[in-house]
Image (cartoon, helix red, strand yellow):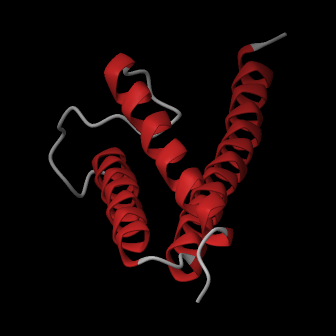
Amino acid sequence: MNKTSRVEFTVELVRILTAIAIAYAVALVTLFCLFLLSIFSTVVQAKDRFGSMLAVGVFFYFFWQICINMGMVIGLMPVVGIPLPFISYGGSATVVNFTLLGIVLNVSMRRFMFKS
């Protein structure tokens, strides 16, 4: 392999890996949008006001955490120590995220208990 063919191979490899990374980034943003949409549907379908407000708080918690983290990665915001929910490593943050998700699931489950 001469030097020119190595450079061409490297350039082609970078193009392929960039395309794959963009596809994964779009998939991740789509999954986060679906996640937030499911929380928002729980907010709309909740029968009691407290459950609805609780789910709204969880929705905005995740929404701002995702927005701030993606803004840091893009370079639009200063870097702070907020992990990306369910992706970045954070011991206590992961526990809090799963606890909040459990609260939203509880609100979603209880919408069948109250009659409107």
| Residue drawn at (52%, 35%) of the image | 86
Residue 87, how many percent across, how many down?
Answer: 52, 33
The single residue placed furthest to the bottom in the displayed view is 116
Q: Is residue 46 above or below residue 96?
A: below
Q: Nearer the viewer, residue 18 or 30?
A: 30
| Residue drawn at (64%, 68%) of the image | 113
| Residue drawn at (45%, 36%) of the image | 99
Residue 114, how many percent across, how many down?
Answer: 59, 75
Q: Is residue 23 above or below residue 11?
A: below
| Residue drawn at (57%, 70%) of the image | 42
Q: Which corner quadrant holds the C terminus? A: bottom right
Q: Is residue 94 above or below residue 17?
A: above
Q: With 39 as the anchor, is 113 left or right in this view?
A: right
* Quarter residue 38 falls in: bottom right
* Quarter residue 7 falls in: top right
Residue 46, how many percent across, how many down?
Answer: 54, 75
Residue 72, how many percent across, how many down?
Answer: 28, 47
Q: Which corner quadrant holds the N terminus? A: top right
